[in-house]
Image (tube, rainbow, N blue to C red):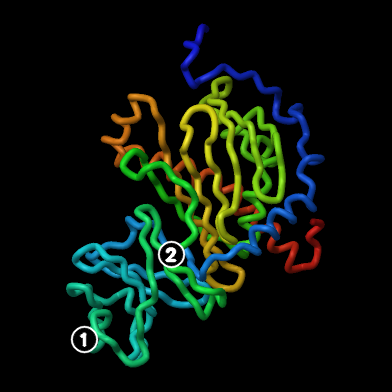
Amino acid sequence: MSWPKNWPIRPISPPPWARQEPTWRGAKPSLISAALNMALAKPSGNWFVLAASSEITSAKPFGRHVAGQELVAWRAPDGELRVGPGACPHLGAPLCDAAVDGGALVCRWHGLSLGDKPTPGWKRYPAHDDGVLAWVRLDRVGGEEPLEAPVLPERPPHAEAISAVATVLGRCEPEDVVFNRLDPWHGAWFHPYSFAELRVLDAGEEEFLVEVTFRLARNIGVPVLARFSCPEPRTVVMHIVEGEGVGSVVETHATPIAPGRTAVIEATIAHSARPGFAYARHVAGAVRPAMRWAAKRLWRDDIAYAERRFALREEGRWPG
């Protein structure tokens, strides 16, 4: 079959799974650990990803624990993101079950209205909506010098992209998730249904450069060059720097829920200069479920990797 020169899809002929080139020599534990430590040393400004922006509406409150803190999030009539403690200061009712009235929450137990005026024992937290993800700043939890806004990676313009967010929960810590993402060598071995012909071209403490083919079918794929980096301690970002979808981003955010519990909140922000992508944006509602499905398919395996690392660390048996 003849493929047009500018067509992103290419025929591939990877060897059988067990015959591909082993990558364990490149995946040096000391190298990955050094990159992890470099990431963990970066400032976060005490910001944590709470959820996808689309999960929080003005219709009903959204509840989630972050670093052991019960939180509630909602939106004011103008769309402003608001986040506060998740327990009513009166008798501890769950505010995720409250009613949204204008810009305030009304507790269903006794009608206490919260959010629009100061209330003893209850105060909203700084919040930020970047158009894809909702963030909350927890200064007492983070213990760092606060930043006015979270540290965000470079992204394609929101109006020119399609974004989707997938969330997976795991029995691990954020560092186990970050370690997993800083090990690109496992891609074609652990995810052969998605990746082929993977080569790490450059690996340093600040970023990894990876050549990989995204599989569309057994013998058809899309080759790209991807850069992995960490803008802050709980985030690993993959930028497509060459090939189809240049400028596209996958942001993997690891949010601690409680000790030994982490939410992986992954934002895929797709972009393409091809004319057909404009049509795809018009039907983004149909595209997003497929993007979320693909992300969760990978994380079915990767959360097992992170959980295994956590379990071995807890037992003092982690070889890295």
Amino acid, disc 2 = Ala
Question: Residue 179 location, x and y as percent?
Answer: 67, 54
The one nearer the camera, 197 or 192, is 197
Vertically, is 202 above or below 89? above
The vertical placement of 176 against 261, above or below, is above
Q: Position of residue 8 (x, y in %)?
A: 49, 21
Label 1 neighbour load within 10 Å: few <14, some 14-19, many 20+: few
Identified at 20% across, 64% down, the residue is 78
Q: Nearer the viewer, residue 125 or 66?
A: 125
Residue located beneath label 1 in the image: 111
Of helix, strand and loop, which one carries label 1?
loop
Going by the picture, which residue comes out furthest to the top? Answer: 2
Give the x, y percent position of residue 235.
55, 56
Answer with left or right where residue 246 lies relative to residue 171.
Answer: left
Q: Secondary structure at mark 2?
A: loop
Label 1 is placed on what type of residue? Gly
Identify the image quadrant of residue 315.
Answer: bottom right
Q: Residue at x 46, y 62 (%)?
A: 150
User: Left or right: 303 with respect to 85?
Assistant: right
Considering the image in quadrants, where does the C terminus appear? Answer: bottom right
Give residue 149's mark: 2
Q: Is residue 104 left or right of residue 280?
A: left
